[in-house]
Amino acid sequence: MSPEPRHLGLPGLIKGLATTARTLSRPTHTAEYPDTKPALPPRSRGVIALTEENCTSCMLCARECPDWCIYIDSHKETLPATTEGGRERQRNVLDRFAIDFSLCMYCGICIEVCPFDALHWSPEFEYAETDIRDLLHEKERLGQWMQTVPPPPALDPASAEPAELAAANRPPRAAGGLRERPAPRTARAAKTAEPAPAQPEAPAQPEAPAEPEATAGPEAPEAES
């Protein structure tokens, strides 16, 4: 069998050089990081930030985490009664809240299940470490990232009023224990409070003809005694 000619790869090489020459004449679109910061979308999943004041150590985030990368330690603290004859209360005090980002897969389940809005997404992503063991961040570092959390988007004007605002705007209870009926607070509420247009009356049904009364037959002659 004769060897293949070496000039068969030449057209492919020339085609590749032509593509390179065309690319050299075009402007570049590459952002030179870190000199140029990337424009990230507002809901980027960069890192998880913590609001320590909102955490009640309920352990929901740690139990629902599929990677078991959240570590929480707390202790109970007794609060004295606020009124005379009242009862003392207990609350959980957060001692440790740590997230191991070497195990985290950024699913966001911990943020979704938190009932007190203690965890938030931050677009911050510049926390790389040379040692993987340094990716275990404690609550102090997680709290610093709260400064980079973007504000929540505004609600849709046509959406329902949040339950928190509805409870805050609810009128106080009267002496009898009944609430006064609140007046509409906005023009939209006033429009919704307008009575519905009257429905047209249905046409009257024709009355059924009355049945003729039964007539008595001829009286039978009385029997003579």
Image (cartoon, helix red, strand yellow):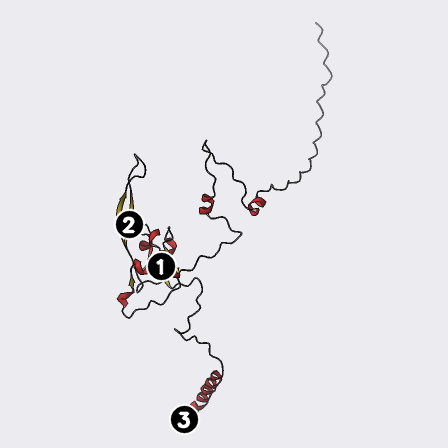
Query: Can you tell which of label 1 and label 3 is closer to the viewer?
Result: 1
User: Amino acid type of disc 1?
Assistant: Ala
State whether residue 176 is above or below residue 215. below
Q: Residue 196 — which label?
A: none
Residue 33 lies, in percent from the top left, at: 40, 74
Q: Residue 93 — which label?
A: 2
Q: Name the residue under label 3.
A: 6
* One can see residue 5 in this view: no
**Disc with the residue nearer the chain's start (1 vs 2):** 1
For the N terminus, which image quadrant? bottom left
For the C terminus, which image quadrant? top right
Q: Mark 1 points at which residue?
A: 49
Q: How far apart are marks 1 and 3 (CA)?
A: 61 Å
Q: Which residue is drawn at 31% across and 61% down?
A: 141
User: Amino acid type of disc 2?
Assistant: Val
**Nearer to us in this view, 10 or 125:** 125
Q: How far apart are marks 3 and 2 (CA)?
A: 77 Å
Which SS class for mark 2?
A: strand
The crowding category of the residue bearing disc 2, from other C-alpha atoms within 10 Å (few below 14, some 14 to 19, many at least 20), is some
User: Amino acid type of disc 3?
Assistant: Arg
State whether residue 153 is above or below residue 193. below
**Disc with the residue nearer the chain's start (1 vs 3):** 3
